[in-house]
Image: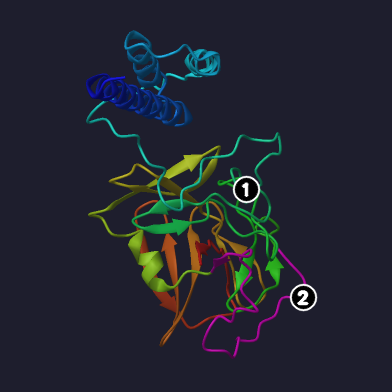
């Protein structure tokens, strides 16, 4: 064999080796693409491999086919429309499990010990007079019962005469909480509260009759809320005899100065004033504590 022929054979062997090396590199790239899930890229490399004389590889063809059938198409998030994050410390509202929610009950009607109240010029008044200690009269036009100042004993507002009347003057200079006849959550008003009812710029007042009972109606000029006080009269301090029922109304204040103060009214007017006769029996209308 001539030297020229030997060189030709050697060159052919080098070219063959280079081709085999390149093919192996392509096969390695296909395997990497498949391992990373790039099915389309692997298919293109394999097609080019075969077109350039590469030997078909059943194993690679099988893997490409499986990759293509299992590839999942992911819908991209629209541009400029990021997903709304869940607010910090605000977990999603759980689905109800048919267990009712427990709420604190709210008085929605009057009972013997509760009252919805009515606001007149910023003061919440009970809508009914005090009846027996710790209770309200049934209706707003009911007279309830009468009380001596700073005493919790109730007296009838309908019987003309009573027995066991206490003619002594109460010694205290303030109406104590213990002797307050108002139900829980209510108290005897002070004079300032009573005087809000006589603020003519904010409250309109008039003598009227409700279900045959005479008394005074006070109406808030801004809200239209109304308060009715029956004219129950009073019991005299000397023997407890009932006077002026149906023509005058007298309502105690818990305020004490030179006198014990009260609201009083009749058909012509309503006023506040004072008395030094605390053994007298008057009506009580409570305000919210």
Whole-percent x, y for residue 276 in the image: 48, 83
Q: Residues within 10 Å of mark 1 (few under 14, many from 20)?
A: few
Farthest top residue? 51
SS at mark 2 in the image: loop
Whole-percent x, y for residue 233 in the image: 55, 60
Whole-percent x, y for residue 206 in the image: 36, 47
Question: Height in image: 67 above or below 97?
Answer: above
Numbered label tally: 2
Q: Is 101 inside the magenta-drawn segment?
A: no
Question: Height in image: 138 above or below 174?
Answer: above
Task: Identify the residue position indicated by label 1 in the image.
Answer: 103
Of the residues under marks 2 and 1, which one precedes in the sequence? Answer: 1
Whole-percent x, y for residue 163 in the image: 77, 71
Question: Height in image: 89 above or below 173?
Answer: above
Q: What main secondary structure does the magenta stretch of the protein show?
A: loop
Give the magenta range: 161-187
The residue at 22%/54% (across/down) is 201
Query: Mark 2 or mark 1: which is in front?
Result: 1
Q: Give the distance between the C-alpha atoms of the residues marked 2 and 1, in whole angstroms.
A: 47 Å
SS at mark 1 in the image: loop
Q: Nearer the viewer, residue 207 or 199?
A: 199
The residue at 33%/48% (across/down) is 220
Could you say which disc has been placed on residue 164 in the image?
A: 2
């Amino acid at each position: 064999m001539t030297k020229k022929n030997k060189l030709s054979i050697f060159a052919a062997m080098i070219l063959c080796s280079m081709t085999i090396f390149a093919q192996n590199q392509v096969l390695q790239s296909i395997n990497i693409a498949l391992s990373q899930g790039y099915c389309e890229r692997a298919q293109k490399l394999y097609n080019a491999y075969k077109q350039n004389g590469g030997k078909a590889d059943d194993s690679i063809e099988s893997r490409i086919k499986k990759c293509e059938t299992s590839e999942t198409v992911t819908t991209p998030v629209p541009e400029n429309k990021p997903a709304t994050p869940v607010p910090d410390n605000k977990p999603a509202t759980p689905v109800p499990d048919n267990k009712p929610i427990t709420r604190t009950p709210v008085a929605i009607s009057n009972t013997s010990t509760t009252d919805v109240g009515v606001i007149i010029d910023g003061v919440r008044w009970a809508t009914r007079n005090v009846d027996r200690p710790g209770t309200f009269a049934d209706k707003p036009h009911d007279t309830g019962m009468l009380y001596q100042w700073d005493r919790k004993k109730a007296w009838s507002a309908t019987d003309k005469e009573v027995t066991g009347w206490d003619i002594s003057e109460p010694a205290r200079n303030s109406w104590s909480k213990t002797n307050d006849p108002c139900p829980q959550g209510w108290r005897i008003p002070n004079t300032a509260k009573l005087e809000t009812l006589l603020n003519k710029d904010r409250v309109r007042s008039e003598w009227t009759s409700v279900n045959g009972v005479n008394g005074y109606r006070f109406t808030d000029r801004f809200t239209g809320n109304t308060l009715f006080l029956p004219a129950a009269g009073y019991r005299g301090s000397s023997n407890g005899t009932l006077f002026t029922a149906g023509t005058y109304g007298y309502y105690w204040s818990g305020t004490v100065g030179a006198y014990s103060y009260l609201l009083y009214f009749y058909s012509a007017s309503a006023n506040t004033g004072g008395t030094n006769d605390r053994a007298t029996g008057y009506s009580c209308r409570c305000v919210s504590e």
